[in-house]
Image: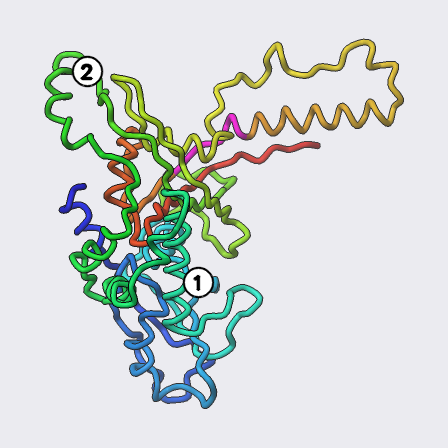
Amino acid sequence: MHMEARKYVWEGAIPLQIHLHESEVTTLPPPPPALILAPRIGYLPLLVGLIKPYFGSSLPPGVDTIWFEYKGLPLKWYTPTGVLFDLLCAEPERPWNLTVHFRGYPVHVLIPCEGEDSVKWSFINSLKEAAYIINGNCKNVMNMSQSDQVELWRSVMNVAGNLEAYLRVSSKLKLITVEDDYTVKLNSSSKSQQGTGETDFAGQVKTGRIPVRLYVWSVSEDFDDLEDAPDIDCWDKISFINRPVEVHTEEAGKCFTLRDAIKTLLPEYFTDKPLFSDESPKLEDEEMNLSSEDAGSNKNTEVEEILYEHVTRNAEIKLVRIQGIEPKLEIPFSWVVNNLMNPDYFLYMCICVRVPEVNTV
């Protein structure tokens, strides 16, 4: 593992400008926004200790039920802050302007959050899920000592991010994802490839199951500049895929890449089949003998299949973002996993896909 890359990810932060919602301001003048540097690997509710004292004197009486929104969209508290930023800001906004609420929790959109304890157990459950995917069981996580569990959580919760403490505890969990031979073999591979113009890396990974959480944002409009990308105004526009990637030992001269991983998760966007092939279903002469109702049903099914193939064949991946980085799809997947995964051992990927609209009339 590249410790330099891992440290870079661990210390990554997003500048936030947090506004108190106007309906909850009881003082004149209203309080100015709070400026906070939020850890990428952290969670928004963990910032309450900094935000509540700042806005406390301006709040109306009542019980605090804190939640955040961006452009009217309530933010899911159990999703890492960096993932929310990568997903909702196609063109990175710095500082990221968020609105905080202390009243009117949107129970129809967000599951309840009881503060730090809710975030902690969400993280631990995520870690258990990752352990089960990797090892087939989560015994090591379940059997963590109380002191290790506290130290692990504090390392994630700490605003400064204590990477050394995290690595000391997490190493006891024995959650080996994939073996990254890429760095070790890079020099020897490059020497053997001089003059060939190829980028093959032999024996790059061992078999493994990688915990992946994929957020897919589909748009119908095309855009060349990220600042022209349409906003996400509801969570229904996001497809959430929580599925492991199976990584198998590649034959000599091959490398399992990020593209290969995305292809296993979204195979419909990587079809190489022609739009119309000899195997495509066609209405033969004998089908004319069917009843008009059956024939109409078959025609509709055939049209739907062809249109679906047309849409997916012409779909285009506009953006892949992991930990704020837009990596090339040819990068070895083992390097991505071992350097860009979150502390819960999940690799979070945000992908924007343009899916053209088809007029069926």
Report the side of 36 relative to 212 (left or right).
left
Is residue 159 found inside the magenta-colored segment of the image?
no
Residue located beneath label 2 in the image: 197
Residue displayed at 37% across by 43% down: 135
Name the amino acid type tagged 2: Gly
Name the amino acid type tagged 1: Leu
Label 1 element class: loop
Residue located beneath label 1 in the image: 75
Residue sitting nearer the eye, 51 or 227: 51
Residue sitting nearer the eye, 72 or 11: 11
Is residue 313 found inside the magenta-colored segment of the image?
yes
Vertical order, 280 against 63 (above or below): above
Instruction: Tell me the distance, in whole angstroms, between the alpha carbons under discs 1 and 2.
Output: 46 Å
Residue 21: x %, y % from top left: 42, 76
Determine which of the numbered discs, if any, sits on residue 51 in the image: none
Residue 35: x %, y % from top left: 26, 71
Vertical order, 53 against 285 (above or below): below
Residue sitting nearer the eye, 53 or 315: 53
Vertical order, 23 against 190 (above or below): below
Label 2 element class: loop
Q: Label 1 crowding class (10 Å Cα cut-off): few <14, some 14-19, many 20+? A: many
Report the side of 201 relative to 246 (left or right).
left
State which region is magenta: 312-318
Residue 223: x %, y % from top left: 42, 39
